[in-house]
Amino acid sequence: MLRAGRTRTTESVDRSYFLQYERARNTGTNPPPDANALSANYVWTRRDFDSRLFPTSGHGLSLDVGGGVTVGDTRYPFGRLVGKWLGYIPLGRPGGQADRNVARGTRIAARAELGAVLANEAANLPTTQLFLTGGDNTVRGYAYRSIGVTLPDGQTAAGRYLVVGSLELQRPIIIDGLTSAWDFVAFVDAGGVADKPQQLTAKVGVGAGAQWNSPIGPLQIDLAWGVATQKLRLNLSMGVLF
């Protein structure tokens, strides 16, 4: 991948615009053919949280808009849209004597992501322009990028449409009337990838875990059950990725 452009970052808003050339080479059994593309892209992100390191209220929104053309024996135009949203909804504060500057209340963390690539069905798009999901910060309970389009031979490939959603309860653990550095979390995640919108079906993961609010950011450890795979997975994540 080659990229040239400009990025401007402020306290609450980031903007990027760039030209990008990419070539995807796929390996494995009967892999998709190699593909090249040239595209122009614009990414806008706004964060409105009460804290960048330990958010307990507020929301963030990101929009990624791009368009380009496949490069090779055949050339097809395409468009790509991705939207992400993360919100924290306070449900109250702990009742202990903890310092109000650091005390955290019970809250809901809600997350949503939508993506679409619009192109002719015959267009050979780079896998890097398409979608896969699953893993620590998407759909817990499934392997990293294991949710995609299932091919006739059972393999998983990237798809043109993406939908992901999550609801997570975060409740501080109170010890001797004081708010500790730990939170209890319980969550449900769901996500799906398909080549057509009507083919989207969600794979669900449910679970619980603990979050340690360390000096450098939240560290979360979860046990998640993949409903579709009937398997239990350990998930780890660090910081607020938005």
Image: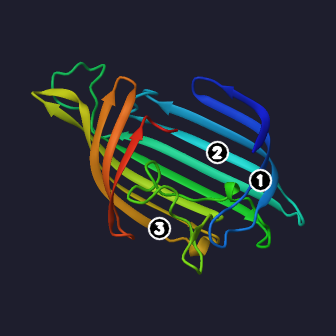
Q: In this view, does 7 lie to the left or right of 49?
A: right
Q: What percent of the width, then of the height, locates residue 182? A: 25, 34
- The label on residue 202 is 3
Is 53 in front, or is 220?
Answer: 220
Mark 1 is surrounded, within 10 Å at the Cα level, by few (under 14), some (14 to 19) or many (20 or more) other residues, namely some
Numbered disc in front, either 1 or 3: 1
Q: Which amino acid does label 2 sit on?
A: Leu
Compute the Cα span from label 2 to label 3: 22 Å
Helix, strand or loop for disc 1: strand
Q: Name the residue under label 1.
A: 23
Q: Residue at the bottom extreme?
A: 152
Choose top left, top right, bottom left or bottom right for residue 140.
Answer: bottom left
Q: What percent of the width, then of the height, locates residue 196? A: 64, 72
Q: How is the image coloured?
A: rainbow
Helix, strand or loop for disc 3: loop
Q: Is residue 18 above or below residue 198?
A: above
Q: Mark 2 points at which residue?
A: 63
Helix, strand or loop for disc 2: strand
Q: How many marks?
A: 3
Mark earlier in primary sequence (2, 1): 1
Q: In this view, does 192 lie to the left or right of 30?
A: left
Compute the Cα span from label 1 to label 3: 30 Å
Mark earlier in primary sequence (2, 3): 2
Compute the Cα span from label 2 to label 1: 24 Å
* Image quarter in which the N terminus is found: top right
Q: Is residue 197 left or right of residue 207?
A: right
Residue at the image point whose x is 62% and y is 30% from the top:
13
Numbered disc in front, either 2 or 1: 1
Mark 2 is surrounded, within 10 Å at the Cα level, by few (under 14), some (14 to 19) or many (20 or more) other residues, namely some
Q: Which amino acid does label 3 sit on?
A: Ala
Residue at the image point whose x is 62% and y is 71% from the top:
29
Q: What residue type is labelled 1?
A: Arg
